[in-house]
Amino acid sequence: MKVKNICCIGAGYVGGPTMAIIAQKSPEITVTVVDINEQRIAAWNNPDVEHIPIYEPGLSEVVAEARGRNLFFSTDVDAAIDAADMIFISVNTPTKTYGMGKGMAADLKYIELCARQIARVATTDKIVVEKSTLPVRTAEALKNILDNTGNGVNFQILSNPEFLAEGTAVSDLHKPDRVLIGGDLDTEAGREAIQALVGVYAHWVTEDNILTTNVWSSELSKLTANAFLAQRVSSINALSELCEVTGADIQEVSKAIGMDSRIGPKFLQASVGFGGSCFQKDILNLVYIAKSFGLHEVADYWEQVIIMNDHQKRRFAAKLVKTLYNTVSGKRIAMLGWAFKKDTNDTRESASIYVADYLLNEQATVVVYDPKVTQEQILADLDYLGTRSEAENRALIHVVNSAEEACDQAHAVALMTEWDVFKTLDWNSIYAHMLKPAFLFDGRRLLDRKVLEEIGFDFYAIGS
């Protein structure tokens, strides 16, 4: 079958960019992205395309090309479901904060709500595609709901996990390493559904880069891919601490390791720790799955990746406090960067949140600047932790409009996100307007230590 109408439920960091690229590359397919969040849909429909809700380099240009032609954003979820041949589910699957599996298992309530809405509305056969990151065998639960609560409609369930990286999402979608599609390979209807989705991606992806598997393999591949990448980050961060006590340089060690063709250089940059919506959530999900099958040694192995990541964030904050004479009470600390990585406005699980929380607990005054993250989001991130009241957070943390303003009269600067703009700041001028001695803590190894020490900074970096 040829797909003519696509509906995507969920207008977030996955659904929005993915559907924009599909619409750009497949002008004959009508793509409708739906969400019950009216504010978010209004932002996607903003006439000024530079103010769409997600910042990704190149995304606004893609949306401008396709929006109104064959790409649409709507809150009318039922109408989009009814019209679609293929429905992508791209809603949030956070880690559970309650009940069985609290703190580890994925919360699938939004997935189930989508399935029940599809079953209620659909009157023609549909292909339903899991785009959210889901635990193994979720497709089976989806099929049970759709087959038993629908209107006699035939549903095929596919798994099509995303492997895009925030900050490079557009290029990742334009030139993916692979597209993974899992489905029912044992039936003719299942194979036809798989080929229908293959046909969508084949508009711009070579078929050699489109892999087809059974559903369970596809679901597990997503979790393990993220777990392997996060493992590399925690591994190099563990070595960064060893470098500090032995006198080795983590950048030199990382370069030497990365030149081994069997290992490679990617994800071997020491930092305050990994963040984002996927790594921690997916590893915890993997840990929960392993424990549920009694594989406790497997669970312990992967859980250590999370433990090391949390340790790195605490260690960075504690190092800052210790260096400032074991107290930051009443001191002004500038934090440059709040997003979990550069070229995105996503702050989920950002190391900056936890470092700021640690410093606020030590009664520091924290002043934040990030090129793309709003004050509203920064305050919401701190409120979500529940460490202090909303009023206390608003009294203790200040969000400003430039790096220079953040650093003015500060005792110390903490570089938290590897935004390119921070590399080109006038550090001589910044140093001149700070309180002396002036400390700089580089959590991403962005800057040249010798240059900063020549200016006069007391300089501290991960692994230094």
Image (cartoon, grey):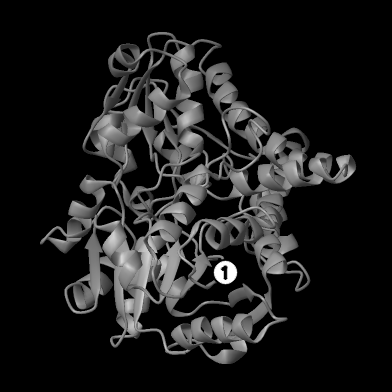
User: How busy is the neighbourhood of tag 1: few (under 14 within 10 Å), some, or many (20 plus)?
Assistant: many
Q: Quadrant of residue 245?
A: top right
Image coordinates of residue 116 in percent, x first then y, are 46, 53
Image coordinates of residue 336 in percent, x first then y, are 37, 38
Q: Is residue 308 visible?
A: yes
Q: Residue furthest left?
A: 47
Q: Residue furthest front?
A: 152
Residue at image coords 27%, 33%: 376
Image coordinates of residue 301 in percent, x first then y, are 82, 44
Left or right for 277, reference 394: right
Residue at image coords 72%, 81%: 186
Residue at image coords 38%, 9%: 330
The residue pinned by badge 1 equals 157
Image coordinates of residue 76 in percent, x first then y, are 24, 57
Asked if 359 appears above or below 284 in the picture, the reply is above
In which quadrant is the C terminus drawn?
A: top right
Q: Is residue 447 visible?
A: no
Q: Amino acid at mark 1?
A: Ile
The answer to which of 108 and 460 lies nearer the viewer is: 108
